Image (tube, rainbow, N blue to C red):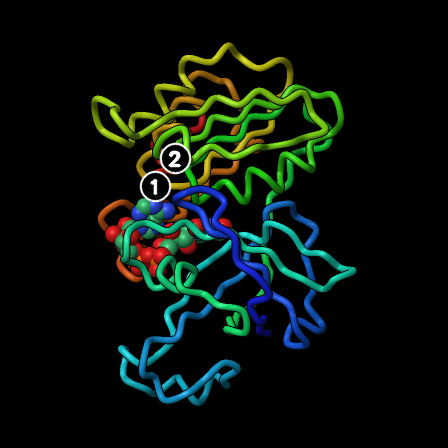
Amino acid sequence: MHGEVVSTERLTPQLIRVVLGGPGLDGIGLPEGADAYVNAFFVPEGAPYDVPFEDDVVRDLPREQRPYPRRYTVRRWDAEQRQLTLDFVVHGDVGRAGRWAQHAQPGDRLQFRGPAGGWTPDPDADSYLLVGDESALPAVGACLEAVPAGRPVVAVLEVEDAAGELDLASPGDLTVHWVHRAGAAGPLEDLLPVAVAALNPLPGVVSAFAHGEAAATRAVRRHLLEQGLVARDRLSCSPYWRRGHDDEEWRSVKAAWTREVEADVPLS
Ligand SMILES: Cc1cc2nc3c(=O)[nH]c(=O)nc-3n(C[C@H](O)[C@H](O)[C@H](O)COP(=O)(O)OP(=O)(O)OC[C@H]3O[C@@H](n4cnc5c(N)ncnc54)[C@H](O)[C@@H]3O)c2cc1C
């Protein structure tokens, strides 16, 4: 499956929206979850192939020529226009994916597998809590749209500064707490857990996610479970990326990390 860039838009200094279209999206099947993601492939400069490519053409190439896989949340699928919207964090002039988005031009192509996965706010919960950094903003945006009308939903979101804040909308009764990295004292991975610890408990049965940087999501998860604020089976915790690791390094240790995280709060 591949899409052709139709347009790009800088949503904030850290976030670029890329809309993909074209016949390469024919047959796309979307899972029912609200925060489905694609596994996109970023072709290194000078590689001897173009999108679309076959797996067996790239499989045996040297590592530096093979495509680099990265996961991106489906912010929106417009079935009428047949357009797929992805929002990319740009984090300096580094990152295979971040840099691709920064330089993307109409007509550029992006190959991907999926979409797959996808968490959805429990329709039978009484309230909702969504926690994350910029990389989770597409998932937050999609999940906020899936919250049942009128129910309380709180989002705690870490961005660089006020310019990184987005307008968010939900049929739910939405409260957003923005947390800024700029000027923060103390370790960055403490920002979200501290902001979450300062919240008033949400009413009734809570459905929640913490997605984004690994250490921060881990600390948020620990707090929510230790305090009994969210039941284990109503909490999605997804460590999307790890500060100081690129995605290859992160994926090589992610399974061990996930096992450690599961042991953080023993089952009672
Ligand atoms: C299921 C899932 C859904 C995801 N959805 C999205 C999405 O919709 N939008 C999105 O932007 N990301 C999303 N991510 C995260 C994204 O896949 C990773 O951040 C990825 O590492 C970015 O790749 P890159 O090539 O730009 O940087 P890499 O080459 O992986 O990393 C280069 C450097 O940048 C740092 N870095 C990576 N990501 C960030 C970041 N967000 N902020 C600051 N520094 C960073 C790394 O630690 C490393 O030092 C998702 C991840 C998963 C698992």
Disc 2 under 8 Å from ligand 1? The reply is: no
Please give the name of the residue rendered at 60% of the width and 66% of the height, measured from the top-left corner. Answer: 6
Please give the name of the residue rendered at 37% of the width and 57% of the height, measured from the top-left corner. Answer: 98
Please indicate whether residue 24 sits to the left or right of residue 129 in the image: right
Please indicate whether residue 247 sits to the left or right of residue 163 in the image: left
Residue 70 at x, y = what percent?
42, 61
Location of mark 1 (residue): 214
Q: What crowding class fits label 2: few (fewer than 14 Cα within 10 Å), some (14-19), or many (20 or more)?
A: many
- Residue 251 makes an appearance in the image: no
Please give the name of the residue rendered at 54% of the width and 44% of the height, measured from the top-left corner. Answer: 138
Q: Is residue 224 above or below residue 52?
A: above
- Residue 20 makes an appearance in the image: yes
Please tell me which residue lies in front, 238 or 185: 185
Please tell me which residue lies in front, 222 or 183: 183
Q: CA distance from mark 1 to mark 2?
A: 5 Å
Q: On the rendered image, what quadrant is the N terminus found in? A: bottom right
Disc 1 under 8 Å from ligand 1? The reply is: no
Q: Secondary structure at mark 2?
A: helix
The circle drawn on residue 217 is 2
Q: On the rendered image, what quadrant is the C terminus found in? A: top left
Q: Is residue 48 above or below residue 131?
A: below
Q: What residue type is disc 1 on? A: Ala
The answer to which image quadrant residue 249 occupies is bottom left
Please give the name of the residue rendered at 56% of the width and 22% of the height, measured from the top-left corner. Answer: 154
The answer to which image quadrant residue 47 occupies is bottom left
Which residue of the protein is positioned furthest toward the top in this rendering? Answer: 200
